[in-house]
């Protein structure tokens, strides 16, 4: 089969599309014929050795994908060849086939195609976990989303709206803010040209944001923390800008703000019941048309490396999906 392979942690440009033997399903595993794999920022980090998880080499990146079960391993009785599924596997999706633990698979929900299925679990799962479990977001509260036209950002916009919040999107261009508005954002701040803190205070009558979703990090985090309301929650989700910011703790003391970490990949293993309840909620919202996976580009496996490079260089919006013909 064809697979995009990482042979050594290093530049994304060194990923190679190669022929490799088909994977075998181990005990408790299934082999999925991948039809679509979406890109997430961690795919760019994992191949450079910059992610908290470092798979054994060589490996294919591609954390989440959808496809068809081809073979099942010993002890798997919940799935059969031919079943359409989606998976959060962590890596391995940028290949024609992937062997994955059956526990990491979900049947493709009704009405969801492979591309949508590949662009569903990681970003919406992170957004719901962050806003419901970690921040306890209430209807009517203000949510500020940084990087609001990115994968996690757009998911946070839609999930916050589905939870009854008012959403302020912050992003680096008018085009990105238009996309966030199409996905439900009530207001937008272009943080490339506008002062983030002052704009948030202006849009909230001086109150500030009750919840901040920050998947970006870098210089905007401190401005966003300064724009967080009294006892508001600042959610540390990621550092797409590259810099892990250091925040002055007096900003936390002064308004009794809460700075809260979000680690969806770990939380779903520690609290599987809660994860299943989140997935059920997300599937219901999808069926009701409240969640619309923001697929902005479809490319083939041969273009996947270039797409990962563009994502790492801030040159994509929404979700890029790599489609693999059967
Ligand atoms: N904690 C968790 O459980 C969890 C789960 C999933 C993902 N994450 C993390 O969340 C972050 C976002 O992931 P994603 O898949 O949503 O990424 P993405 O789709 O690439 O979006 C990231 C956004 O960050 C902004 N950005 C600012 N500076 C950037 C730079 N130098 N390079 C790239 N983007 C930059 C961009 O928006 P503007 O141009 O508008 O600023 C971009 O849209 C990543 O750090 C990822 O590791 C965390």
Image: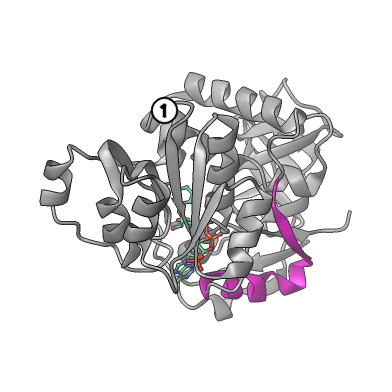
Within 10 Å of the Cα at label 1, are there few (<14), some (14-19), or many (20+) other Cα atoms?
A: few
Which residue lies at the image location 78% right of the left edge and 61% below the top edge? 1
Q: Is residue 254 visible?
A: yes
Judging by the rendered image, the residue that carries numbered circle 1 is 133
Q: Give yes or no for residue 303 being in the magenta stretch.
A: yes
Magenta highlight range: 293-313
Which residue lies at the image location 63% right of the left edge and 30% below the top edge? 282
Q: Give yes or no for residue 209 being in the magenta stretch.
A: no
Q: Please tell me in which quadrant of the rendered image residue 284 appears.
A: top right
Which residue lies at the image location 63% right of the left edge and 53% below the top edge? 181
Q: Position of residue 149 (x, y in %)?
A: 58, 58
Q: Is mark 1 within 8 Å of ligand 1?
A: no
Q: Is residue 262 visible?
A: no
Indicate whether 233 appears above or below 299. Answer: above
Farthest residue, direction front: 205
Number of marks in the rendered image: 1
Towards the viewer: 172 or 96: 172
Colour theme: one colour
- Residue 33 appears left or right of 282: right
Towards the viewer: 9 or 270: 270
Q: Position of residue 79 (x, y in %)?
A: 76, 26
User: Which element carries disc 1, helix, strand or loop?
Assistant: helix
Q: Position of residue 266 (x, y in %)?
A: 41, 37
Indicate whether 190 appears above or below 157. Answer: below
Q: Please tell me in which quadrant of the rendered image residue 77 appears.
A: top right
- Residue 256 appears left or right of 301: left
Q: Position of residue 162 (x, y in %)?
A: 60, 32
- Residue 324 appears left or right of 132: right
Indicate whether 10 appears above or below 85. Answer: below
Which residue lies at the image location 72% right of the left edge and 33% below the top edge? 286
């Amino acid at each position: 089969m064809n697979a995009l392979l990482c042979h050594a942690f290093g530049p994304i440009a060194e990923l190679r599309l190669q022929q490799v033997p088909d994977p075998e399903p181990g005990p408790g595993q299934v082999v999925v014929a991948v039809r679509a794999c979406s890109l997430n920022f961690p795919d760019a980090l994992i191949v450079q050795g910059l992610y908290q998880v470092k798979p054994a080499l060589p490996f294919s990146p591609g954390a989440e994908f959808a496809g068809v079960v081809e073979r099942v391993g010993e002890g798997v009785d919940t799935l059969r060849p031919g079943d359409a599924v989606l998976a959060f596997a962590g890596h391995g999706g940028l290949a024609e086939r992937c062997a994955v633990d059956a526990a990491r698979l979900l049947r493709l929900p009704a009405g969801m195609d492979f591309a949508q299925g590949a662009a569903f679990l990681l970003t919406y799962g992170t957004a719901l976990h962050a806003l419901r479990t970690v921040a306890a977001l209430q209807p009517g509260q203000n949510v500020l989303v940084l990087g609001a036209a990115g994968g996690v950002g757009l998911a946070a916009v839609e999930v916050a709206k589905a939870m009854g919040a008012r959403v302020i999107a912050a992003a680096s261009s008018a085009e990105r803010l238009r996309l966030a508005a199409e996905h439900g954002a009530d207001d937008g701040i272009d943080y490339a040209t506008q002062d983030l803190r002052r704009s948030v205070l202006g849009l909230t009558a001086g109150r500030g944001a009750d919840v901040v979703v920050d998947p970006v990090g870098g210089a905007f985090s401190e401005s966003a923390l300064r724009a967080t309301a009294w006892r508001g929650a600042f959610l540390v989700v990621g550092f797409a800008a590259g810099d892990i910011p250091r925040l002055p703790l007096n900003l936390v003391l002064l308004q009794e703000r809460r700075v809260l970490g979000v680690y969806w990949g770990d939380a779903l293993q520690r609290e599987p019941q809660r994860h299943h309840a989140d997935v059920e909620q997300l599937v219901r919202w999808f069926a009701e048309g409240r969640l619309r996976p923001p697929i902005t580009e479809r490319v083939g496996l041969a273009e996947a490396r270039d797409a990962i490079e563009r994502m790492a260089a801030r040159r994509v919006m929404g979700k890029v999906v790599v489609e693999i013909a059967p």
